[in-house]
Image (spheres, grey):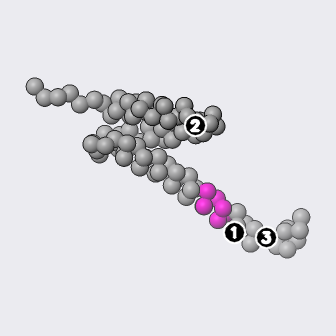
Amino acid sequence: MGRTVLPYSHVWEEERLRWQKFRRALRREDQAQFDRLFELARLHLQAGVYASNPWPLESMLLSMLLEHQKTISALEEYLQQLETRGHSASPDEADA
């Protein structure tokens, strides 16, 4: 019989648990951010399943980076909109 492959959600959880000692060594505010990284990776479980990477941490890290890139892009777009509004304002509006 073949070997049973764990569902990727279990692999994700095992990887998260593997990093718990590291997490405990972080400052409390950093622990919250660390937890957020793993939640970001969880958003892409389906991609991890599809990739079937022998090193699941790589898929998780890329998922985290993807979410960060989306945030950066959204912030850049928002900043561009603010700059455009600032440049289009008349001098009277800028003084107000």
Q: Amino acid at mark 2?
A: Leu
Q: Does residue 52 appear left or right of residue 3 in this picture?
A: right
**Residue at 37% from the left image edge and 42% from the top image edge:** 57
* Mark positioned earlier in the residue sequence (3 or 2): 2
Quarter occupied by residue 51: top left
* Mark positioned earlier in the residue sequence (1 or 3): 1
Work out whether residue 80 or residue 38 is closer to the camera in this orientation and state it: 38
Which element carries disc 3, helix, strand or loop? Answer: loop
Label of residue 89 in the image: 3
Work out whether residue 45 or residue 15 is closer to the camera in this orientation and state it: 15
> To which residue does mark 1 refer?
84
Which element carries disc 1, helix, strand or loop? Answer: helix
Q: Is residue 3 above or below residue 46?
A: above
Q: Amino acid at mark 3?
A: Ala
Q: Would residue 32 be counted in the magenta stretch?
A: no
Report x, y in % for residue 69. Answer: 51, 55
